[in-house]
Amino acid sequence: MSRNDLGKYSEAPQAAARFVAQQLVMKPYVWSALSVHVHGQRHLDDLEAPFIAIANHSSHVDATVIFGALPRRLSRNLAAGAAADYFFNQKGKSLGTRLFFNAYPVDRGGMKGHAGLSGRLLDDGVPLLIFPEGTRSRTGAMAKFKAGVAALSIQHGVPVLPMALVGAYAAMPYGQKLPVPGRPDVHIVFGHPLRALPRETVPRFTERLYNQVVELHDTTARAYGMPTQSDFQRSVALRAAAKKKAELPPAEE
């Protein structure tokens, strides 16, 4: 991708079109369907682009809530990494994803062709939104983070903004095409921006980022009587045990 192509992620006309799409279409709809609660805004006071925003990922409302909750100065050119094989395989889908989320393609599943794009955007001053689990959770339970965010942060010298989304899975679980009725509560929690410690390795920084998102999630979940990550993991284990038991042959008498 050339520098001219990179410019479309931060140029004023595109930013103005995104503002209209996000603030007049996307946010009003989602905010009317959900009861969104924002926590930790004070942690954003000294944050400047470029940075990498990360969060747990369990619902198609996640990115919308993040863009709507961030102040305009941070969300204006925020570019969301989106799976190239899902969001960029059809022209209409890719246009909508670019318009609403300033999305750029991320390869997964052995695909190639967009390597290094995240780093080039950061070097061009564009902040990124990346879900480091790599895909949406099917159960609400978080998967371990992939190492890409930590590596990008270290290599390009940018901070990572950890965020947690609480209640998003219940509001629009995997397979739902619309949020469930009744304006369910969804909390978004901003944490302190983080950088790698001196001599901290990519795997250790990745683990620290994961633990921070879990802590943000569970502290808020407990405060509002919502499922913690331990609760989600326990439910997964119980379902797996029940399935295994059902598959066993009947005991002989």
Image (cartoon, rainbow, N blue to C red):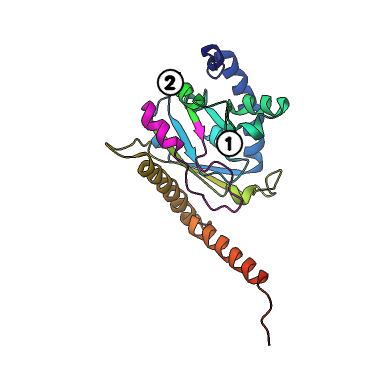
- Residue most extreme to the bottom: 253
- Residue most extreme to the top: 4
Per the model, the C-alpha gap separating discs 1 and 2 is 25 Å
Badge 2: residue crowd in 10 Å (few <14, some 14–19, many ≥20):
some
Horizontally, residue 198 falls left or right of residue 182, namely left
Please tell me which residue is depicted at 55% across the width and 30% down the height of the picture: 80
Please tell me which residue is depicted at 59% across the width and 35% down the height of the picture: 64
Residue at image mark 1: 110
**First in sequence: mark 1 or mark 2?**
1
The quadrant of the picture occupied by the N terminus is top right
Q: Which span is picked out in magenta?
A: 129-158
Q: Which of marks 1 and 2 is in front?
A: 1
- Find numbered disc 1 in the image and state the secondary structure of the residue it sits on: loop
Please tell me which residue is depicted at 59% across the width and 23% down the height of the picture: 19
Foreground of the two, 26 or 80: 80
**At which x and y percent is residue 120?**
47, 21
Horizontally, residue 42 falls left or right of residue 243, namely left
Residue at image mark 2: 123
Q: Does the magenta stretch include residue 157?
A: yes
- Residue most extreme to the left: 198
